[in-house]
Image: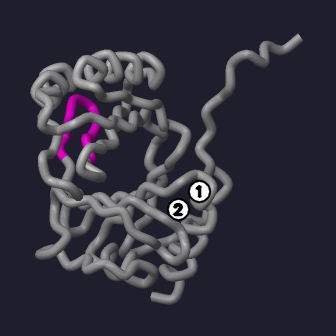
Amino acid sequence: MADTSVLTRRHPLESRRAALEALVGDPAITLEPLVSAVDLRVDPDGGALDALAAALGGPLPTAVDTWTGIGDGEALRLGPDEWLLTSAGTDPHRWEDRVDSLAAPFGGMAVDVSAQRVALRLHGAHARELLASGCSIDLRPGRFGRGRCAQTLFGQAPVLLVAHADDDLHLFVRSSFSGYVADRLVDAAALR
């Protein structure tokens, strides 16, 4: 009898990988590997940020809608007391426990949200133009440059945009909307 106690992580956009890879030219759209993600809620003035930064391998951003690198991932400041922490190589359950144990003495908490979102990478000189086809925020590099992130809509889907460089943007989307977003990006790229 097969062991059903362990679920296999599969990328929700695996069925669309071929369509994304078939796009040639600029911009290119690629699926990012699945990462561990923890939603952290803690008072930024309560002293927790220094303890968390030391333990996580980098500072947490102090301004909303910005991100910093931490260890093998990123810390994205989503709101006054909320961060999304990502890690490429950490077991999500152990990481959640670790972050939660660091935040708890300061009245904070951490929740594993690894299965909540997937990421697409748009890179090339026309990546911002492609995103602008379905997004209403100002994506010009002077307004949305490296180190910035924003929660917005792409079409009708809520997304989280992360600027890594002028020609390198990551788009986090909830798994349930990921097919819609991937299809819309492929259609918009085909019209270029």
Residue 62 lies, in percent from the top left, at 12, 46
Nearest to the observer: residue 162 or residue 124: 162
Residue 68 lies, in percent from the top left, at 17, 44
Q: CA distance from mark 2 to mark 1?
A: 6 Å
Circle 1 residue: 17
Nearest to the observer: residue 23 or residue 110: 110
Local crowd size for mark 1, using a 10 Å CA cut-off: few (<14), some (14–19), many (≥20): some
What kind of secondary structure does the magenta stretch mostly adopt? strand
Q: Would you say 51 lies left or right of 101 here?
A: left
Query: Residue pushed farthest right?
Result: 1
On whether residue 69 falls in the magenta region, the answer is yes
Instruction: Tell me which corner region of the image, top left, top right, bottom left or bottom right, holds residue 11.
Output: top right
Say if mark 2 contacts mark 1, CB within 8 Å.
yes
Circle 2 residue: 21
Q: Which residues are magenta?
A: 68-76
Element under disc 1 = helix
Query: Given the image, on which type of amino acid does mark 2 rest?
Result: Glu
Residue at 49% across / 36% down in the picture?
114
Residue 97 lies, in percent from the top left, at 40, 17
Instruction: Tell me which corner region of the image, top left, top right, bottom left or bottom right, holds residue 143.
Output: bottom left
Does 43 sit above or below residue 146? above
Residue at 32% across / 37% down in the picture?
41
On whether residue 113 falls in the magenta region, the answer is no
Position of the N terminus by quadrant:
top right
Residue 61 lies, in percent from the top left, at 15, 45
Element under disc 2 = helix
Instruction: Give the total of numbered labels.
Output: 2
